[in-house]
Image: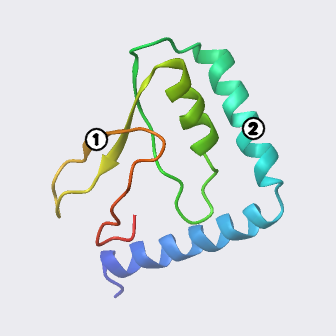
Amino acid sequence: MISLADQKRKLRSIAIERRTKLAASVNTNRAAKLLELNFLSFFKPTQKVSIGVYWPFRQEIDVIPLLCQLDKIGCHCLLPAVTGRNMPLQFRSWKPGDNLVTSRFGT
């Protein structure tokens, strides 16, 4: 019988493979720009609003142009930080040019 951990590893591997194939078929610069435009037009963020975001990893869509635009607007961008096993994520302030530290999970 296959363990739950092995099942999760297998499913994660399949998902990563599918995302890699999909990313290869997409104009990633255009996708990032469309994400930025759609987000800004739908949510209309204003100064001093805090927004939890993510840093792109592997073939995830590049949200960095959006983050830079949010910073220009005056939003407070927060990135998740993994602090330990079975610990809740902590969100830490981010601004363009900040140095990021890679966690033990490679994120």
Q: Which mark is residue 33?
A: 2
In this figure, which residue is indicated by the disc labeled 1?
A: 92
Label 1 Cα crowd, 10 Å radius (few <14 / some 14-19 / many 20+) = few
Q: Quadrant of residue 103?
A: bottom left
Q: Residue drawn 46% across and 46% down?
A: 54
Q: Residue drawn 54% across and 36% down?
A: 67
Count the marks: 2
Viewer-proximal residue among 76 and 40: 76
SS class, disc 1: strand
Q: Quadrant of residue 58?
A: bottom right
Q: Give the amino acid type for the residue marked by disc 1 in the picture.
A: Arg
Q: Residue 49, position in %: x, y?
A: 40, 17
Would you say 26 lies left or right of 32 here? right
Q: Residue 11, position in %: x, y?
A: 50, 72
Q: Quadrant of the N terminus?
A: bottom left
Q: Residue 85, position in %: x, y?
A: 17, 64
Q: Quadrant of the C terminus?
A: bottom left
Label 2 Cα crowd, 10 Å radius (few <14 / some 14-19 / many 20+) = some
Q: Give the amino acid type for the residue marked by disc 2 in the picture.
A: Lys
Q: Where 36 falls versus 91 (above or below)?
A: above
Residue farthest toward the front in the current orientation of the protein: 97
**Rounded to the nearest whole Å, what is the CA distance between mark 2 and mark 1?**
25 Å
Q: Where 50 falls versus 87 (above or below)?
A: above
Q: Residue drawn 28% across and 41% down?
A: 92
Viewer-proximal residue among 55 and 18: 55
> Cβ–Cβ below 8 Å for labels 2 and 1?
no
Would you say 100 lies left or right of 72 here? left
